[in-house]
Amino acid sequence: MTYLDNSATTKPCPEAVAAITELLTEEWGNPSSQHELGRRAAHRLEDARRQAAAALGAEPERVFFTSGGTEADNWALFGAARRMAKRGNHIITTAVEHHAVLHPARELARQGFDVTYLTPDGNGFVSAEKLAAALTPDTILVSVMMVNNETGAVMPIAEMARATHRACPDAIFHTDAVQGFLKIPFRAKSLGADLISVSGHKIHASKGVGALYVRPGLPLPPLLFGGGQEKDFRSGTENLPAICGFGAACAAAYPTLRADLAEMARLRDLARERLAAVPGCVLPARGDAPHIVLVSVPGVRSQGLINCLQSEEVYVSAGSACAKGRRSHVLTAMGLPNETVDGAVRVSLSRFTTEADIDRLAAAMADAVRALKRQA
């Protein structure tokens, strides 16, 4: 099997599986319990927080666990808007965000906030200059993704955060770093973002866990009320097995991160070269992220490509796995022709991808294109 849909989800690494298994079968206490089993569970929770914080470049006490990237994004947008509503009502995001940001932004617009959607260039990139031009004295929140999940475009988050805080000192800057975490090296303490969302199942942990980084001194409203877990920000008994798996995945990836990313980028470039050589294939955008390749066969439906490839046990996706068959809003916002959008598939790598995987992808793509062109 050749799995190249790692932007949708990744295979849990052995370290994460071992941690999850241990927390399900041995250290299964409630971290809020006051007996020995509970105290051990609480220690494991804080160990995982330190592991995640180390990978984020953050203070452990500023990392709050969630059920995933979508929850972290929702908490960031709704919490920031609620906190800042008395100071203004202007929110800026981009037209190419994940729906976990776009849909909350749409809901905030329904509630009366003025939302500006920045459009990208032909590669899906939004510049810091474009953001700076959209800022107003009424701007209270900016949310820009670190890496686009369909094109691999890397946004200039540090520059954007500086521009936002320079023009609007009180505004809150959020970045959805779900596709950037452990793919684009950054340190939360120096990035300049006030809020950073990450997800476990994109970095070889399990589904159902993520985190929100909240900068020191930012009093974000609580997400959930109840027993006071996560320092009163997100009440409810912690999903300790998934959290410890998340921490283990962070610890396993971080020591060799730069070497792994360099190899991933080499394989990305190889994939682009091999796919560009397939008659009928085009590369509509070339993002800088090391793990995403966008390829299209204009005149062929993406689902047909996916079906042909999976018949040879090569697995890719049609843009975001969350889009569920709808035409990509990202590629449409880039101004690509409909036939290019409709024929686009996303190839996404991980640190476990091999050159043999790229060879199998190229061969399977050539076979798929030939077969589908004959049927057209």
Image (tube, helix red, strand yellow):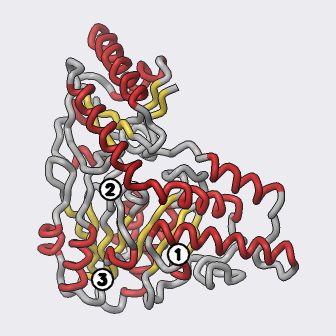
**Which is nearer the eye, 241 or 259?**
259
Rendering coords of residue 325 (x, y %): 41, 37
Q: In this orientation, does residue 247 appear?
A: yes
| Residue occupying the far top of the picture | 374
As measured in the structure, the alpha-carbon distance from the residue carrying label 2 to the one carrying label 1 is 20 Å
Q: Disc 3 and disc 1: Cα gap in Å?
A: 23 Å
Residue at (26, 30) in percent of width and height: 296
Q: Amino acid at mark 3?
A: Ile
Residue 73 in view (yes/no): no
Rendered image: mark on residue 147: 2
Of the image marks 3 and 2, the number of the one nearer the N terminus: 3
Q: Position of residue 287 (x, y in %)?
A: 24, 48
- Residue corresponding to mark 3: 140
In the image, which is nearer the foreground, mark 3 or mark 2?
Answer: 2
Q: Nearer the viewer, mark 3 or mark 1?
A: 1
> Who's the residue at 67% across and 49% down the image?
17
Disc 2 element: loop
* Residue 221 point in image, percent of width and height: 51, 84
**Residue 63: mark:** 1
Marks 2,1: beta carbons within 8 A: no
Quadrant where the C terminus lies? top left
Residue 338 sits in which quadrant? top left
- Mark 3 to mark 2: distance in Å? 23 Å
Q: Amino acid at mark 1?
A: Val
Query: Where residue 113 sits in the image (x, y, percent)?
Result: 32, 77
User: Image point 46% across, 76% down: which residue?
Assistant: 58
- As helix, strand or loop, the secondary structure at mark 3 comes to strand
Q: Amino acid at mark 2?
A: Val
User: Hey, which quadrant is residue 223 in on the image?
Assistant: bottom right
Name the residue nearer the viewer: 65 or 51.
51
